[in-house]
Image: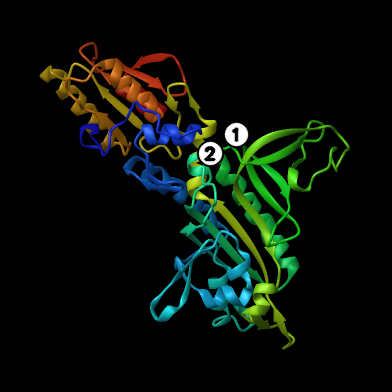
Amino acid sequence: MKYSKLFPKTIKQVPIGAESVNHQLLVRAGFIHQEMAGVYTYLPLGWRVIEKISNIVREEMNKVNGQEILMPVLHPGENWKKTGRFDSFDVLFKLKGAGDKDLVLGPTHEEIIYPLLAEYVNSYKDLPLHLYQIQTKFRNEPRAKAGLLRTREFIMKDLYAFHESDEDRDEYYKIVREAYLRIFKKLELPVLITKASGGTFSDLSEEFQVVTPSGEDTILICSKCDVVINKEIAGKDCSECGGVIKEEKAIEVGNIFPLKRAYAEVFNLSFTDKKGEKKIVSAGCYGLGISRVMGAIVEVSHDDKGMIWPESVAPFRVHLVGLDLEDKSVMEMAEKVHKLLEAEGIEVLFDDRVGVSAGAKFADADLIGIPYRIVISKKTTEDKLEVKKRSEKETKFMSFKQFLEIV
């Protein structure tokens, strides 16, 4: 991809009202554009990151036998009235459709997936069943803030798993828990598994929290046994060992919990077991905020110059910076390196702009935060590419072959 053709370019100004790091840097670097509070357009660089996060999540969900579906954004209000959440869900977007029908913009999908399965699940032979989606969701947050960390429109993965028994559900819970740990390891996000109240869903759940000053949650970390608890349910001392606890601000990027049987009972999601007896399904829900993860990565991986993307989700692997491109021979060399990298399957953002200073190009490269920077200039020879890793200060000189061995 040539930077001269990329939409849009970086901006120097910090967006008005942008207090969090992710909001400031993602807008300045041209990854997202704010349409109103809590609503963003994902621009080409940003969407590449979203897709890579989604694919990492998708890969791990498929490994635990998840089947991907896509449920609607627009829900019949009648389903939400049946569960009582049409009036009790305080951040629900409601609207009127044709025939004065009540409709809802989906903030979560229990009201869709339970009646869906009630039409298809009849026997124990239909279970277990693991269905997930990556979907845009809506919540009418009274105070959208902190960039992608708290929005009114967001992208989320949710996996719903249905089982014959609580025991089977709990075994699968452990499997998905491990899958989440693998996901966050690939994303290079330092998550803390946090005990927390399940709110409307469950008496107990686990959150995956990332410590950041922009976080809206307060978590308590025991200095003695490393137990982490959401402040909502914690005392002054660690419940496990009695050790001293310290407070940290954090952002929740994932949440896993068992679902009570209320939804199954409302929508009559039941099955006939091996003895011919009718039983209510046991279920679990596993959520992960795709767009929130993007913001969280920026919060924990940046410096005073810009973002530092993990290689697993960076929009491109290499930022090829061409200097002295007015010189035809230098431009030809830069074009050659660009083509060679792409031929090796390496994603490249090539800054091919003519007449832009080296300082401006380097500043843009640091702001965008692609893992590797290669500089081509009058000083460059085929055996001496100027290579710098975004997360390091030192510049190294190496041949094209040596660089390929690194990446």
Instruction: Name which of mark 2 and mark 1 comes first in the sequence.
Output: 1
> Looking at the image, which residue sits at the far right?
242
Going by the numbered disc 2, the residue's amino acid type is Ala
- Residue 150 appears in the picture as rendered: yes
Which residue reaches farthest bottom?
Answer: 276
What element does badge 1 sit on? loop
Quadrant of the rendered image containing residue 82: bottom right
- How far from the left and from the top, in percent, is residue 225? 81, 35
CA gap, disc 2 to disc 1?
Answer: 8 Å
Q: Nearer the viewer, residue 189 or 300?
A: 300
- Looking at the image, residue 392 sits to the left or right of residue 269; the answer is left
Q: Which mark is residue 296?
A: 2
The front one of 20 and 365 is 20
**Of 158 and 56, the residue lying toward us:** 158
Callout 2–callout 1 Cβ contact below 8 Å? yes
| Residue matched to label 1 | 212
